[in-house]
Structures are given as C-alpha cells and as structure tokens.
Image (cartoon, coloured by chain):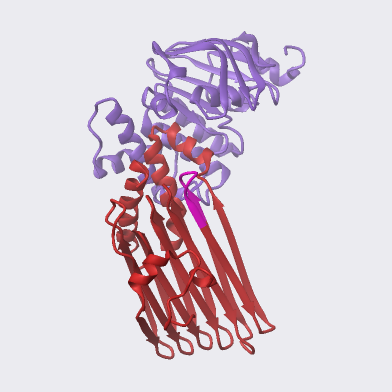
Amino acid sequence: MSDLATIPTSKSEDWRYAPANALAQIWPIAVEEIHVAAGGSDALTLVQDGGDRSGGGEPIARQILLVLEDHAEFDLTILNLGGTYSRIAVEARLGKASRLFIGGVQLAGANDKLEIATEVTHAEPDATSRQIIRSVAGGTASATYLGKVRVERGADGSDGAQSVRAMLLSPTATANARPELEIYADDVKCAHGCAVGELDAMGLFYLASRGIAPRQAKALMLQAFIAEALKGAADADNLHAQAQDRLSRLLEGEL
Amino acid sequence: MLQIHNLSATVADKPILKGLSLTINAGEIHAIMGPNGAGKSTLGYTLGGRPGYEVTGGEVSFNGQDLLALAPHERAAAGLFLGFQYPVEIPGVSFVQFLREALNSQRRSRDEAPLSGGEFLKLAREKAALLKLDMEMLKRPVNVGFSGGEKKRAEMVQMGILDPKLAILDETDSGLDIDALRICGEGINSIMRKPDKAVLLITHYQRLLDYVRPDFVHVLAGGRIVRSGGPELAVQLEHHGYEDVA
C-alpha cells in the first residue's frame, strides 16, 4: 500500500483525511498478516471502537495484509464504531479464482474521524471481490472510505465490485468516498457505485404513520441502511445489536 | 369521531384541498371517490401528517383532539391508521420487528403495557391468517419483494395488529386481483366494521365497495366534496363517470 517507514503527510492521497497528530501517535503501524491457503476458507470480524464518547480516546489504526491463494475464500466484516481517529486498512492479494467479501460499517458521531481503506489486487485470473461499505456520520464527524481495486495484467475473468454509500445525519458531518479502479487486464468485470444522502423522507413518514417516534424511526431506517454490509457475517445478530446501540446514542445526542 | 371543517392544504405551494368539510361518526364507513388529481390522496396524507403537505386553513378534530396539532406518530397513537397506496419497502428490518416496535410505541404512549415477544407473535399470526398471508412473510424485510397484492394485504395485517379507531385507506383496491380484493374487503369488514370504529375508503372504483359496503359516498373534485349520497351514488358514478356530478 504505502511505505510504512515514514509518517505520511496530508499530501499523501491514502492519508489525506488523517489528522497529523493522530498519525504521530500511532506510527509505525504493525502489519497483521492473514494467509488463506489454496482452497481454504476463512472469515474475520473486526469491531473497533476508539472513542470514549466524551470526544477523547486514543487513535487506533490497524493494517491487515490478506493473501488469498488459488481458490481460497475470505469474508471480512468491519464495524468501525468511533474514535478521534479509527482506521482499518486492508491490503488484499487475490490468487486464481479466489473470492473476497468485505462488508464495512462505520458509525461516526461527535468529532470522530473514521476510515476504512482497502486495496484489493486481482493478481491472477478469475478472482471475485465484493466490497459493501456503509457509513453514517453525525455531529461534526467524518467517515472516509478509500478503496482501490487493481486488476493486474493477465488477470482475465476478474470480477470486482465496490458499493459505497454514506448517510449524513447533520449538516456539519462529512463523508469522503474514493472508490478507484485500476485495470491492466482485458477481460474483466468491475463496477463501483457511490452515493451520499439523507434518510428517505417517505420511509420515515411510513414508520411514523404506524406510531413510531422520529428517533426510533431514524434508528430503524439506519438499521436498514447498514444491513447489506453485515449480511455475510457469522455473528450478524450480535453486530446488529452493537450497531443499534451505537446508532441510538448517535441519534440521541448526535454523539 | 372525525370532523373536518373547511380544510385547505397545499403541496409544494400548490393549493390542492380548497375548503373540504366532512364528518365521520363512529360505526360509519365512508367512501371518497373522484377523478385523478381531485385531491383524494392529498386528503389522506394531510390527515396523516405527511411532511410537505401544508395545512393553510380549516380544522380537524379527531375524538375531540386537534388532529393537526399532533405529530404523525402521535396521530397513530391516537387511533388513526393510514393505509398507503404504495407501501414503502424497508430492507433490513423485518415486519415482525417493525410492527412490534410500532404497536408497543403506541401502547406506551397510551400508558398500556407493551406486549411480550410471544404475545405479539400470537396476535400477528391471528391477523396474518385473517388476511391469508403466510406468517413466514412477516419475518421478511418490510414489503421487500412483495407483490402489489401482498403489500396491500400486509397493510391490512398491520391495521389488524394496530387496531385503530379510524382507518383511512388510500386505494387499497389498486393492484389487487379479484381474490385479493375479496380477502382485503373481508379483512376490512372484520377488523373495522364495529360500532366504535370508522373507515374512510379512498378509491377510484366501485369494485371494493361491493365487498365493503359504505354508508356514505362522497365525490371529491377540485379539492372539495361536491356531492354526497348513499351507496347508490357509487353505482351511479360507475355508470356515468364523474363528469355529470363533478
């Protein structure tokens, strides 16, 4: 991904949304390596919460290197729940006909700065990658997704997709999304979509018309919004419960 | 139960309701018919409190309460149910969760004890059976992947569970085949035809009224009730169209 020896500055595209003082505290970031052998399959759920809800908390960053050998499969679910700076970066290298799913949810309130960064390389033919990222930001928080899908020369039959959506709960919240494709092979299928929006007014009215109060209606709509990203997780119920808890606090005081 | 007096409302600054008056008593079923663009759906949304539907004049009293002063969820808790012409899909939230939260929100605001999971499921199963909707469908996300007819039957299941005093049903008959129409009609009768309840049916066609016999029929045109009568008025409209009366 990037050179981990020196602290990057905001001029570096991969780190432009990271606060400089947070980077100084967390640098250098250790790389955690995950290797899935040929034909193997594995899954990981990361729940990261670097906030103490009063706006403090230490910055956290994780850097994961994921290597999938031929025909290997991996499901990664990320729940990024808060922090002055909370980053999860994944660099993945996909072998022949391997499959990677990344579902990411970020719930940012107060002055949180949350970030998911991915770089998925289709190094061999016929691999599939799917990324579904859903971010919610309130207060003066920011939620960022930086995601690159690279298809190397000769990696024909690659299929990579990124779906990135963000929901803003306040006019002072920020969502950054940068889905990128870098394709050096001919026969590939890649798609990315990105949208930033507000909660659907008709949906909120429908819930209200059944007697559900505004805050609860928003929490339900946000549950609906993030659901797709958590769909693959083995412990989806538990993740939903943690997300709901965070969302209701986020809506309560915009924290 | 419901007194609408001289109600005017605008949508995006455009006047739609222009001094509409209507009184509905407990035990009555009223049908509002009228040509496209007459303001039928606007009436339903305005009474339900949809944002963007701005009341510019008149009063609405619902069981002695000023309906227009209440937020949409408070209107529901006060006993108003709005059946949607196009029910909204909410992926990722099951009907069971949605309706249990809705019912218990209403009960809490009336100082009634919330239903337990078991009690709620028993009630939901009973109402789903009434509308011949498979209980399994209520475990799915709200309206997602439902056909037009299933959505409307699910609306009626919601009505059965929430047990309102007044139901305003906006084109519940649209998109229904003949069997679904009969099932919905029978559902409305069984849930709402009671001495302490009332229904306002908004419809284009006579056909729903074959199953749910109205006590009064009104013609809405140009934002006002231009004619009222008994059930025979609906038949007359079916034969002669709105041109003669509106």
User: To which quarter of the image does residue B27 belong?
Assistant: top left
Q: Is residue A3 left or right of residue A35?
A: right
Magenta residue check for B24:
no
The one nearer the camera, A236 or B160, is A236
- In the rendered view, tell whether residue A159 sits above or below residue A226: below
The one nearer the camera, A66 or A124, is A66
Q: Residue B157: give x, y in percent of width and height.
A: 42, 37
Q: Is residue A202 left or right of residue A37?
A: right
- In the rendered view, tell whether residue A107 sits above or below residue A40: above
User: To which quarter of the image does residue B67 belong?
Assistant: top left
Residue found at the very far right of the displayed protein: B243
Q: Quadrant of the N terminus of chain B?
A: top left
Q: Residue A194: give x, y in percent of width and height.
A: 58, 60
Q: Residue A112: give x, y in percent of width and height.
A: 38, 56
Q: Residue at x 50, y 84 (%)?
A: A94
Q: Quadrant of the C terminus of chain B?
A: top right
Q: Is residue A94 visible?
A: yes
Q: Is residue A78 visible?
A: no
Q: What hue represents chain A?
A: red
> What range of the chain is rendered magenta?
A166-175
Q: Which chain is purple?
A: B
User: To which quarter of the image does residue A18 belong?
Assistant: bottom left
The one nearer the camera, A24 or A244, is A24
The one nearer the camera, A61 or A194, is A61
How many badges with numbers are in the image? 0
Q: Residue at x 53, y 13 (%)?
A: B215
- In the rendered view, tell whether residue B1 sits above or below residue B139: above
Q: Residue B153: give x, y in percent of width and height.
A: 49, 39
